[in-house]
Amino acid sequence: MKRTIPLLLAMSAGFVMIVAFFIPATLTWGEKVSIWFDILASIAFILGGGNLLKVQLKKISDKTAGWGYSVITVVAFLVMLFVGLTKFGVNPNPAFPAHGHWAGQYNEIGSPFWWLYEYMFKPLQATIFAMLAFYVASAAFRAFRAKNFEAILLLVTAFIILLGRTAAGVFLTDFISADSGFQGLRLENFTGYIMDVFNTAGNRAIMIGIALGTASVSLKILLGVDRSYLGSGEE
Amino acid sequence: MAQLMTLGITAAFLILLTFAVISWTNFFKTIDRRWVFLLMLFSVAVPVYVIGKTKQTFPEKALPLAQAVFDEIEKLNEGDKVLLAFDFDPGSEGELGPMATMFAFHCATKKLKMYFIALWPLGRQMIDDNIEKVIKPDFPEMIYGEDYMNLGFKAGNEGVINVIVTDIKQLYTTDAYGRDINQIPMMEGIDNIQQMDLILNVSAGFPGTKEWVQYAVTPFPHQIRLVGGCTGVQAPLLYPYIPEQLPGLLAAIKGASEYESLVIGKYGGDGISGKYLEAQRRMGPQLVAHVLMVLLIIAGNIIYFVERTREARP
């Protein structure tokens, strides 16, 4: 029962979506399934929060390596949740005076939630993303080697794209007239050519392969052949 | 002449770099990676400082994809409806923020009706930022609910697109601020996003432009038109959809810079605020960082070949 009901739910939802795509009269069926999906996705946030607490609290109680980071994660999670859910420090909405601060906007400028987002979350997330530049630079220096013909091709392409996406590309090949027959060799145009032709061709081939694979896996799931998504069944 | 001189200096610098790396191969081979990090820091920080001081930017020439995005918006008339889907967060704000700002500026200048939406939880904040940055200070005559509105974030990724392409009010009963959607004037007569004249998407990943193409444009190719902007790593994956399903695409800060130059060239005028030149300004740090990357790769390969030659010697 524990596996049969989810299996039947997945099968019926999947087939409804396929039918709804091909038969316009059944479009509303697909719409309903999509709305269920959206509701489930919202509930998944609660599940995700619960899971985060469970995993991090276990790390703290076991005192595993780096458990201090788990403390920070749990505290940050709970503070943000409390401030957001209780609308802590939010000004009342003049349009609904009877509801006090509950009618106010949780993220209005100057509110504690806004402050946490603007001065803590935003710079932290931007910093994490920006760190990529440092690691890419270090990796490029240590690992990007012209070891064989394929690597040389990759290297030359990287140079063209790196320079072609900046003013350096325009400057370095500015001596080629934009009206001449060789204008395609200007770095900015050559970059576009690589993206349009080689990249698109390669990506289309990969996409078609992925699509065929997805269709086959989807059919296996819908027909109940592949049941791995249901888990092992063990607690 | 100036260009020849610069090319000469570049060639001389490369030769010097080659000799330096060959002479101090062991030093470069064992160099602490924190020196590379420091170089990268300076290569970004110095141009940011210089451009901030001088307010100078590099000249930009729009390539066909940025031109196509600009043209799609230019085709619209006053009062036409545009859905602006901001599917990014602060992590990619540095790359995507300027194009989102420019989309809002372009649409507001053309007096288009703007419907903001987000499939990313923090997209809602990105929308609010742009409303506070562009619409409220520079277009105070625009009225919320009549000229622009914020539908906010809804969970469900592509599931949200799948519903709103046929029935938007099934999913959105209120706007982002909790107002009844039926009381908002610009939602009158809007049943689904097929009624939008254009969809503008700013995408940092999943869900993003790819999902808008697959779930909105592909089932309704004659009703829905989509153009967008995305991060650099995402761009190669979106090229296969060009030009049928995706007529225009702003690829990373370079695409944003090209589009920005087109919009500012037509609507900017003198004394345009710096917030509308952000993409062009960010091309400075990008140039130096890219040149540094090229030099690092060259240096790394010189070390590799010197090592290989030494190993081959009897």
Image (cartoon, coloured by chain):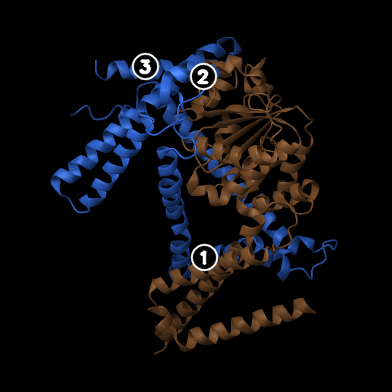
Chain colours: A blue, B brown
Q: Which residue does the image show at 77% across and 32% down from the upper left?
A: B76
Instruction: Report the quarter where the C terminus of chain B lies.
Output: bottom left
**Marks 1 and 2, Cα distance to the nearest angstrom?**
50 Å
Determine whether the residue tagged by mark 3 lies in a helix, strand or loop. helix
In the rendered structure, which amino acid carries the disc numbered 2? Leu
Vertical order, A120 against A8 (above or below): below
**Residue extending furthest left?**
A62
Tags 3 and 2 on a common chain? no
* Picture layout, residue A49 above or below residue A188: above
Question: As shown in the figure, which amino acid type bears the numbered disc 1?
Answer: Ala
| Left or right, B175 with reference to B278 | left
Q: Which mark, residue A151?
A: 1
As helix, strand or loop, the secondary structure at mark 2 comes to loop
Image x and y of residue A165, in percent: 64, 59
Question: Chain letter of disc 1?
Answer: A
Kindly identify which residue carries mark 2.
Answer: B171
| Residue beneath disc 3 | A9
